[in-house]
Image: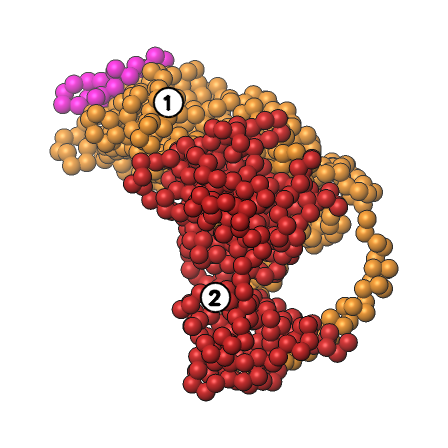
Chain colours: A red, B orange
Amino acid sequence: MSRLRSRRLLCDIAFVVFICLGTRCSYADVRLERQIDQPASSVVKLFGAGLGNLDSYGSGTLVSPEGHVVTVWNHLVNSGYLTAVTSDGQRYQLKVVGTSAKHDLAVLQLEHDGNQLFPCIDLGDALRPVAGSEVRAFSNMFHVATGNEPVSVVHGIVAADAKLSAGLGRWEFPLESPVLILDAITNNSGAAGGLLTDFSGRPVGVLGRELRHTASGTWVNYAVPFATLNPVIKAIRNGESVAAVTDQQTVNPVSYRQLTERWGMTLLPDVLKETPAYIDNVTTGSLTGRAGLRRGDLVVMVDDAVIQTGAELRTQLARIRSGLRLTIIVDRDGALVTMELRAP
Amino acid sequence: MNAPHGSRTATQAPGRLASATLYTLLVIVLSASGFSSVSEAEEPDWLRREQNRIAVLDRIAPTVVCVMPPNGQGGGSGVLISGDGFAITNFHVTSGAGNFLKCGLNDGKVYDAVIVGIDPTGDVAMIQLQGRTDFPFADVGDSDEVRVGDEVMALGNPFLLADDFSPTVTYGIVSGVHRYQYPANSFLEYTDCIQIDASINPGNSGGPLFDINGRWIGINGRASFEQRGRVNVGAAYAISVRQVKLFQGHLKSGRIVDHGITEFSVETDANGRVQIADVIESSEAWRRGLRAGDELVSFAQRSLTSANDFKNILGIFPSGTRIPLTVRGPDGQRTTSIRLKPLHEFQQVPPSPEPPQEPIPVQPVDPEDKPQDETPAELASLFESRDGFTNFAFNRRNQQRLLSRLIDKLDKIDGVDATWKMLVMEEGGTDSMTMVVGREGAGLTQNGIPFHQTDDDPDAAAEPPDFPGLLTAALQWHRLFRGKSAGWAEIVYEGTERQFETGTPVDVLITRVGPVECRWLFAEDNPLPSGVDVQASAGQDEARLLFDGWSSDGAIPHPARLGVVIPASGEVRWLKVQSLEIRP
């Protein structure tokens, strides 16, 4: 009981810290260009053939300057004649580069003379926010935006990172690996294929279709994370077999050895299934030593991610690309201390 | 499916207690040490923001109105805009609810209200709450400054949840700006509106949208619903406060306020230019030289990138507004102005709209809770029915306000109905001209050449070419000054707007006699007009006169300067009035 309570307390602290940090960021008096305008300009309005209740419009996300667009593999892609309107109001025909039924994914490309460069998201910059993180969804839901008008933006949080059991009619959602369940209403007409970003504007995933949960029949709002899709997108663009791509998330935790050699710290060994991320030792003069980390510190957050176990810490550190700045918040004798460092 | 209050409290109490303990602990931990050292600079900031949020809600909640028909069946929302009880809501909330309404405020009280004016095209209605002169009212923000991603709060009465009329608050962000939502049979057209993801549900209609600092930026009116029933799906639309402000002064006139058309159409060409597609030949636009193929560079001082932009801008102005525009044709770029013609020419209040996109007012769960009493007899005089008006009582009251102070000013003066002889001189000129204005005609002698205009058959060709419209307008000025014996066939109070040339807020009074229609402009502090626009006959330019610096130094009041607006250029040519005498 006492362990449970302390875990709960930890979560509450982390939550409050998260809110405080989030508040500072989102209220800062910066105009929302990087967070809103740039992601919005990477989303294209798709037009194809509708049928019955199926819409003749949708959304897609530009993932390469050469005009590669990712979207869900739905009736629009199959309709054969597909056009896209980019954020500057220009209209392009699209060719299908490849699809993966297993990932409900289609990779398309805008047809152009080859000299054009398109605004796009950087798939390498994608991250998978933990449940509770604030996110924004960009799409041309309800076909509200026409021509060069920016697509619609809605806000919400990641409600869960979980396997989805859902479908529509006889069609069943095929993905085996977890997806991000959202509290924002994103399962609107035309929203599928839109872009989910975190609150700083970094890409997160592709907005899903209008589906009902298998058990409850309620409409589900979800996005498939780029963490899952990136290898598939890469394989399709390279003309490789999608079947060879593993469905699992490809992040391997930082090993204990790497942790010592590259980060200069060791953690309390994983004696329990969920051992808290207590620092066991910090090498003087090392990366973490210089940042101010000490033996006995309990890591509670890395950037926006709440850390509950040593394993989570090692996984989270593995997600950070070399050279990027990160913020670590630790609990030191009941007080929260923030430290900044660069990933090795 | 809510459990009764008692049982819910009982079952949740232990959990809540535990949680409260934890949070207390947390607060102690945070305040004791550590946390402040982590973010010493930030803590006051977020604390201040939280306090600000609480203060903002305390300030804005009292301005939100629960609008109900007298029988308490259903209802919507509204927002107070002045201490004397004027409030804005949606047309589709008041439509069908009758002329008297019941309005609940968050003080828990129900106030009587009367319908004032409606704008069926823009889905806006004005009502006036009765019984106080110190109603709390909303701070107006600038909807043109709203950006995608801005935080917003929608206040109102979704599902009529609040028995004590304290409004429900929903939070969201701006999803899009300058959105266009198609009308249903030319009614309820949402132009230049704000798209939000805050929850908007049945009963929210007509309620205010606020920015995060509590400034009023819109009226929540409709949402995208499609096939999932009339509940929020994260795409709702608010009429911009800019549009509401442009209509507000007209709605106070008790009229059915109309939107405008331009008598020319536009299209987006292959290069993304907005160009004139077609111009009606009898129109003012045609006379100003607009032709098919000209590029429309700006309209109402806003640049355009698509024909949609044009619809968006046009939709926020009431009929009768004079709009500046810039076109680029074969002869280069020119700026001019045109007056918007009416879209509908309402004679009757249009029927209740039932488009698919509106969050319809909901039925209260327990009608017994809602006021049932009929409108008190003493309020009956607040409403007067007349064709073409929402509530003629408001029009009559404003006409009387303007006319009675004019007549007060002129009543004691002999000779206002005699013939006037004025000496005028063009500013910068050297020669005085004689101008004579009487009941039957007006004349001007310029450089020895006489010009004469008759009252019963005005002819544009008879006007002095240097001062077109001067004599036609002067004849109407003479008629206005005859006061009670002016003999107008019809008088309508148009409302308040800004004078085109000066930007001064003015009351507009429309008078008609025969085919001649005058728009008299009265500044707030002066019983005498600051301008008049005379439409002598259709298909002809308005005679537009400005009156500047009224002086009582003479037989009758006269302006120190008369400004003649030249239609072709929009330039004002000023004449100094050197003297005014009465000719026996």
Indicate whether B92 appears above or below A33: above
Q: Which residue is mark 2?
A: A320
Q: Give B358 or A244, whichever is nearer the viewer.
A: A244
Q: Are the residues at dot 1 and dot 2 in contact (C-beta closer than 8 Å)?
A: no
- For disc 1, the chain is B
Q: Give B562 or A92, whichever is nearer the viewer.
A: A92
Q: Amino acid at mark 2?
A: Ile
Q: Which residue is mark 1?
A: B264
Residue B124 seen in render: no
- The location of residue B552, given as percent across then percent down, is 33, 39
Q: Give B201 or A339, whichever is nearer the viewer.
A: A339
Residue B433 seen in render: yes
Quarter of the image for residue B359 reads: top right
Crowding near pointer 1: few (<14 within 10 Å), some, many (20+)? some
Image quarter where the C terminus of chain B lies is top left
Residue B209 painted magenta: no
The residue that appears at 19% across and 18% down in the rendered structure is: B450
The residue that appears at 65% across and 80% down in the rendered structure is: B28
Where disc 2 sits, the SS reads loop
- Determine whether, in the image, residue B380 is placed left or right of residue B148: right
Q: How many marks?
A: 2
Which of labels 1 and 2 is toward the front? 2
Point out which mark residue B209 bears.
none
- The location of residue B194, given as percent across then percent down, is 51, 43
- Determine whether, in the image, residue B280 is placed left or right of residue B32: left
Where disc 1 sits, the SS reads strand
The residue that appears at 81% across and 48% down in the rendered structure is: B1
- The location of residue A54, given as percent across then percent down, is 60, 31
The residue that appears at 45% across and 21% down in the rendered structure is: B512
- The location of residue A145, given as percent across then percent down, is 48, 37
Residue B451 painted magenta: yes
Q: Which residues are magenta?
A: B443-465
